[in-house]
Amino acid sequence: MGKNKGNPALIELVIVIFFFSISSVTIVKLFMASYDISEKSKSETLAVIKMQDIAERFKAQPNAVAGLLEDWEKSDNRYVGYFDDELNMVSKESALYIIEITVDQQTMTGGNYIRLHILSYENTSDQKIVLQTNIACYVPEAAS
Amino acid sequence: MSKKFQLRVGIGASSILMIILTLALTSFAVLSLVSAQSDSKLTDKTKIMMTEYYTADEKTEALLARIDAVLINNADAANLNDELGKLNETLHTDENGLLSFVIPVNDNRQIAVTIRILDESALRYEIISRKLESVGDWDPETDIEPWIK
C-alpha cells in the first residue's frame, strides 16, 4: 500500500493563503495609517478655515463679537462652540471638536483693543489641541 | 461516453496570483500613505502660515494702538516724529507726510502699513494701505524659451 502524498496544488494554496494573510496585516496597517493621517489633516484644514472665517468676520466688525457668536455657549467673556467632523455646529453630546474663544477687551488711551484667543481641540478625554491662535483688533474712538 | 469536467490549476499559479495581488495592494497602500502625508504637510504649512500671519497682525494692531496713544499725548509736540520713531524701528515718515511701518510675518513675508495723520478730525489717523507683501529678491529664470505658436 503506497503512502498518501496529498495534492501539491492544495498544499501550495494553503501556504499561499498563510503568507497572504500575513502580508494583508501589514497592508491593512498601511491603509489605516494613511486614513488616520488623512482624517487629521482634514480636521486641521477645516479648523484653519473656521478660524480664518471667525477672524475675518471679527476684523470686519470688532465691536460685534456677541452677534458673531450668537449661537455659541456663552459664559462671561468665553464662548464655546461644538462641531462635528465637517465643522458644522452640533449639540455638545455629539460634538467631535470644540472651539473656545476668549474675548479680552482692554481700554487704551485712544480706543479699545479687542483680542480673541481661539482654541480648537478634539472632544476626547485627552482634549488634543488642533489649533490655537490670537486675533486682535484696535478700534480707535473718536475724540469728543 | 461522457467526459467529466475537471478544473486543473497547475503548481505555482496561486503563488503567482498572490505575488501580483500583494504587490498591487502594497503599491496602493504606499500611494495612499504618500498622498496622505503630502496632504498633512500642506495642512501643517497652512497652519503655520495662518498662525504667523495673525501673530504679525496682532503686533500690527498693538502698534497702531501705541501710535494712537502717542498722537493723543503729543498732539502739539514738535518732537512727534521722534516719539513715533521710538515705537518701531521701521516706522518712518515719507515726503507726503505718510507714516509707514512693517511687521515681519516670517522670513519671506511682512505686513506693510501706511497711515495718514489727521490734524482736524475726531480720529487721529486713517489707514491708507495695509498689505501682506513678499520680502526678498525675485530671481526669475531667464533661460526658459517661451512657447510661441
Image (cartoon, coloured by chain):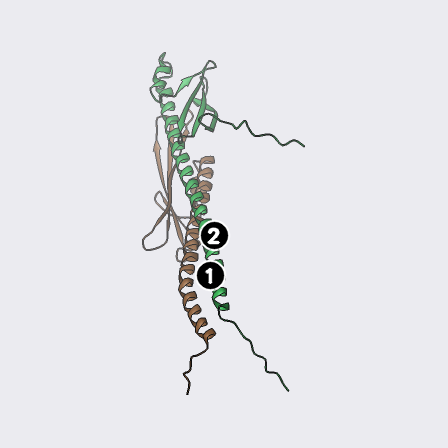
Chain colours: A brown, B green
The residue depicted at 44 percent of the width and 79 percent of the height is A6
Give the labeled residue for mark 2: B31
Look at the numbered disc 1 and give the secondary structure of its residue.
helix
The residue depicted at 44 percent of the width and 57 percent of the height is A31
* Residue sticking out furthest to the front: A1
Q: For the N terminus of chain B, which image quadrant? A: bottom right
Closer to the eye: label 2 or 1: 1
Q: Quadrant of residue B42?
A: top left
Q: Are marks 2 and 1 on the same chain?
A: yes
Label 2 sits on what residue type?
Answer: Leu
* Residue sticking out furthest to the left: A126
Q: Which mark is residue B22?
A: 1
* Residue sticking out furthest to the top: B78
The residue depicted at 56 percent of the width and 78 percent of the height is B6
Q: Position of residue A131 (x, y in %)?
A: 38, 44
Look at the numbered disc 2 and give the secondary structure of its residue.
helix
Q: Earlier in the sequence, mark 2 or mark 1?
A: 1
Q: Chain of mark 2?
A: B
The answer for how far apart the CA atoms under marks 2 and 1 are is 14 Å
Q: For the C terminus of chain B, which image quadrant? A: top right
Please state which of residues B143 and B137 is positioned toward the viewer in this rendering.
B143
Q: Position of residue A105 (x, y in %)?
A: 35, 35
Left-right relation of A35 to B83: right
Q: Position of residue A59 (x, y in %)?
A: 45, 35
Please state which of residues A39 and A103 is positioned toward the viewer in this rendering.
A39
